[in-house]
Image (cartoon, helix red, strand yellow):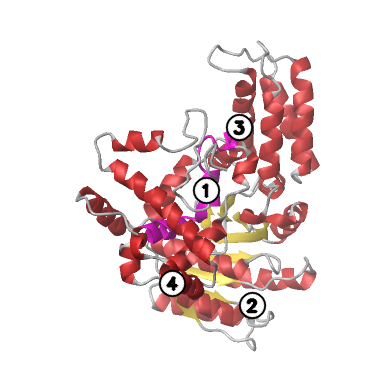
Amino acid sequence: MFDQLSERLRGTLKSLRGQARLTEDNISDAMREVRMALLEADVALPVAREFIERVKQKAVGVDVVSSLTPGQAVIKVVQDELVDLMGSANESLTLNVQPPAVVLMAGLQGAGKTTTAAKLAKLLTERENKRVMMVSADVYRPAAIEQLERLATQVGVALHPSSADQKPEDIVRGALEAARKQMIDVLLVDTAGRLHVDGDLMNEIKRVHAVADPVETLFVVDSMTGQDAVTSAKAFDEALPLSGVILTKTDGDARGGAALSIRHVTGKPIKFMGTGEALDALEAFHPDRVASRILGMGDVLTLVEEVEQKVDRDKAEKMAKKLAKGKGFDLEDFRDQMMQMQNMGGIQSLITKLPGVADIPKEALDQVNDKQTGRLVAIINSMTPAERQKPDIIRGSRKKRIAAGAGTQIQEVNRLLKQFKQMQKMMGKMKKKGGMKKMMRGMPGMSEGGMPGMPGIPGMPPGPGKR
């Protein structure tokens, strides 16, 4: 998300280098470019206009201290205003009520309400230790009830059964009664969507809302619809007492206009954003962290949280002990590392959260390929345990069998073995005194000015001189 906006903003702010003081003259051209960048990102015109005016008022006349360049000084102002525009801080769900706390999911058809409900159920179960029940009050969309049943099983939460011949209000009444009897903490109600905002939909969801009496009414909206997302959010807010917004499909949205406009237009906070198709791909929306990503400054806090939540500590400790004892790093360890990376959303997701990402050449970033990781895991899975533990025994006939088993070519097997050898050398350096520093020095492209190429990690761009 925000790829186009990030690129334009960074280029514009760099133009202010060399100025000793920020004046109205030397900032006007830059702000004109920022305004165009916001509009191209599909930010609502009134939002863009007010944002630019606020930045100009704060930036003009700012003395550039010796430790900052003019571009850095403006970045600080822009960052503060972006944070303010998106809501200052994350607003968590209000669940400290007499159970069950009801959370109503509303939105248009195709926005991803049902999947988002499952993602939220998984998040509340695993991170908040809540007992969650889901119920589908969507009696119109074919297979909507069956989809929620399947998702509830996948995330391991309770499900209140419903059928298409019931009234949505009756479904919710039954779910509330069942949730109370089963001592459920949170009841998630998935409602019907429509292709557009209409009177019938609004009347029905008002009735459902009256029965459910939710503590949270969340509007789920597809971020890729841009200004349509803002328009529909405003329409729902006029019909229902919305408490927040969940942006979905942000991983496919290069513009990000909805995220920058919704809070300003509706006054409702963005509480979560969907970052992928996996059921754990739901992040709390932190305006300060998102602003840092927009300006290419990374998001280390979210990255640390993901590591805490998604990295298998037992496997990591076992590998550390194995290396400490002098035992070799084998292909099973290599596969585990790649799968851990996938659990964290893939290399693309990881890169966007690293500081210095703005300094990586675009052509290098374009080489990042998460799909390659899946192919490499498939190749390793096609090997025998002996081959994974002793890759040196993999010769011609074995390579042919492995490639056939993984549905790929021998060249792909050779490429994997080469990457593995590079990673193996790095791991060997870590065992020696001062090994980490030596490993870093040995990684092509490592410098203080930006992020290195990482030839041992599949899917990462190679360092300079290795292309």
| Residue wearing tag 2 | 138
Nearest the eye: 252 or 319:
319
Name the element at disc 3: helix
| Residue wearing tag 1 | 460
| Residue wearing tag 3 | 79
**Which quadrant of the view contains residue 72?**
top right
Q: Residue furthest front?
A: 396
Up-down: is 61 above or below 177?
above
Camera-near label (4 vs 2) is 4
Q: Is residue 13 left or right of residue 177?
A: right
Contact, CB < 8 Å: mark 1 with mark 2?
no
Camera-near label (4 vs 1) is 4
**Which quadrant of the view contains residue 223?**
bottom right
The amino acid pointed to by label 3 is Gln
| Residue wearing tag 4 | 397
Name the element at disc 1: loop
In percent of the image, x 62 and y 39: which residue is there? 294
Answer few, some or many: residues within 10 Å of disc 2's Cα (few below 14, many 20 plus, some between 14 and 19): many
In percent of the image, x 51 and y 66: which residue is there? 410
Name the element at disc 4: helix
The answer to which of marks 1 and 3 sits earlier in the sequence is 3
Answer few, some or many: residues within 10 Å of disc 1's Cα (few below 14, many 20 plus, some between 14 and 19): many
The answer to which of marks 4 and 3 sits earlier in the sequence is 3
In percent of the image, x 68 and y 13: which residue is there? 19
Q: Which residues are magenta?
A: 334-360
The answer to which of marks 3 and 2 sits earlier in the sequence is 3
Label 4 to label 2, Cα distance in Å? 55 Å
